[in-house]
Image (tube, rainbow, N blue to C red):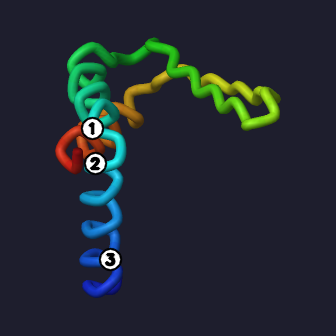
Amino acid sequence: MNPMNVFKLKGLLDRFKVNHPKVPLFFKAAAGTVQEGSIIEIKIVSPENKSIITNFKINNEDIALVNELKDLM
């Protein structure tokens, strides 16, 4: 990965944390409870009140990703 892209990503993530302070707290709390077999559900509601929802079951390989995301937040 290009080091400049890492700095750009860090800046974007820092700004996201300022705009949405509860999200990092949620991910830190959730990372402690996510285990193999957990189901993560994501829902997006548009301004027109249209929804799209998906979910996925966490497998053993996903745990490392969850831990990395926790450390980033």
Q: Please state which of residues 55 and 36 is positioned toward the viewer in this rendering.
A: 55
For image coordinates 25% across by 45% down, the residue present is: 68
Q: Which residue is mark 1?
A: 21
Classify mark 2: helix, strand or loop: helix
Q: Between disc 1 and disc 3, whose residue precedes? A: 3
Q: Please state which of residues 6 and 58 is positioned toward the viewer in this rendering.
A: 6
Classify mark 1: helix, strand or loop: loop
The image shows residue 16, relative to residue 57, as above or below, that is below
Q: Nearer the viewer, mark 3 or mark 2?
A: 2
Q: Label 1 sits on what residue type?
A: Pro
Report, in whole angstroms, how far the alpha carbon at label 1 lies from the one at label 3: 19 Å
Task: Please identify the quarter of the rendering in which residue 20 is found.
Answer: top left
Report, in whole angstroms, how far the alpha carbon at label 2 lies from the one at label 1: 5 Å
Q: Are marks 2 and 1 in contact (CB under 8 Å)?
A: yes
Q: Which residue is mark 2?
A: 17
Report, in whole angstroms, how far the alpha carbon at label 3 lies from the one at label 2: 14 Å
Q: Residues within 10 Å of mark 2 (few under 14, many from 20)?
A: some
For image coordinates 23% across by 38% down, the residue present is: 70
The image shows residue 32, relative to residue 21, as above or below, that is above
Q: Residues within 10 Å of mark 3 (few under 14, many from 20)?
A: few
Q: Label 2 sits on what residue type?
A: Lys
Q: Please state which of residues 56 and 13 is positioned toward the viewer in this rendering.
A: 13
Q: Between disc 3 and disc 2, whose residue precedes? A: 3
Classify mark 3: helix, strand or loop: helix
Q: Label 3 sits on what residue type?
A: Lys
Check residue 8 in the rendering and tell me which mark sits there, or answer none.
3
- Taking the image as shown, residue 43 lies to the left or right of residue 46, namely left
Task: Please identify the quarter of the rendering in which residue 46 is found.
Answer: top right
